[in-house]
Image (tube, grey):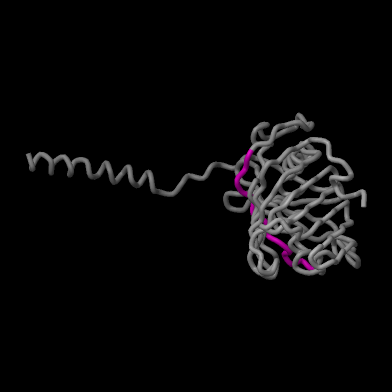
Amino acid sequence: MIIARLFFVVLLGPLVFSAGCALFGPKEELPLKRVTVEDLTILLRQRDAAVYSMKGLFSAKVRGGLIPILSRVEGTVYYRRPNAMRLKGFTPFGGELFEFVQADEWYRLRLPMEGKVYTGSQADLKDQGNLARFSQLSAWAIGGLLGTNALARDETAKLVLEQSRYRLDVYGMPRGGVGHSSRTLIRRLWFDHRLLVVQEDRLGGDGEIEATIHYDDFRSLDEKGAVSSQAIVDAETRLLRPFKISLEAGRGQGVVQVTFHELHQNQMITAEDLGQTL
């Protein structure tokens, strides 16, 4: 009986080893689709157009000193196309930390705990301190959720195949681009094989990276916006949005991880919701 068992183990051993190699060997990368700059440009605009309003809750984990003492922020977001947004941030105990209102290139940042209000061009926001920087990163995260990283009409792009991903280099006039007479690289977008944006670099007028953004935890939103017949991906994939977004501020200024909850899209958003009645 013992000899029979040994014979069975010897006979079975190579099969188990072979199966183990199949289970733990390198994963086969899925082939990339044939796409062009125009294809990706259309896709980004379709994702942008699918959501004309959004409201919901978010939580943010913060590292690196962007918000002294605090490591977690709870918040609310209201958004209405084309570029109106209001963010409110609260401490874990319910105290109001900041209110950030955006309309096109204009912003207003109110800091109740400091008794200060900043207004001006968004190009100057990064110079208003750590809370302003945190507000800017949060607004970029929400833009990534909504799909507002679509190319503007006056922007151009170049497509690069980078290992198992596409990289779209976007050129245009940087914010606050006084003194710039030519287009510069302002964003990089990385797409995976599903044509979902999984990473983004935002660059400043000096060419340095202002933030690297990673998109994860993709989930579907109900489709209520108009979608072109030129779609190059199926409707289910086109509606996937990242519910978890990590942002690394340039020059090692800190890391923010934003998670979204209880999102409601394409509902009525008033001027009062957007903080535009003050």
For the residue pair 190 and 53, the one nearer the viewer reads as 53
For the residue pair 139 and 169, the one nearer the viewer reads as 139
Q: Is residue 182 magenta?
A: no
Q: Is residue 123 left or right of residue 219?
A: right
Q: Is residue 216 magenta?
A: yes
Q: Quadrant of residue 174?
A: bottom right
Q: Which residue is painted at 60% across and 45% down in the image?
A: 217
| Coordinates of residue 36 in the picture (x, y in percent) | 71, 43
- In the rendered image, the vertical position of residue 15 relative to residue 223, given as above or below: below
The overriding secondary structure of the stretch rendered in magenta is strand
Q: Which residue is painted at 12% across and 41% down in the image?
A: 5
Q: Is residue 121 left or right of residue 227?
A: right
| Coordinates of residue 187 in the picture (x, y in percent) | 75, 56
Total marks shown come to 0
For the residue pair 225 and 227, the one nearer the viewer reads as 225
| Coordinates of residue 128 in the picture (x, y in percent) | 82, 68
Q: Which residue is painted at 92% across and 52% down in the image?
A: 278
For the residue pair 37 and 13, the one nearer the viewer reads as 13
Q: Which residues are magenta?
A: 206-219
Q: Which residue is painted at 62% across and 41% down in the image?
A: 194
| Coordinates of residue 200 in the picture (x, y in percent) | 69, 54
Q: Residue furthest right?
A: 278
- Image quadrant holding the N terminus, namely top left
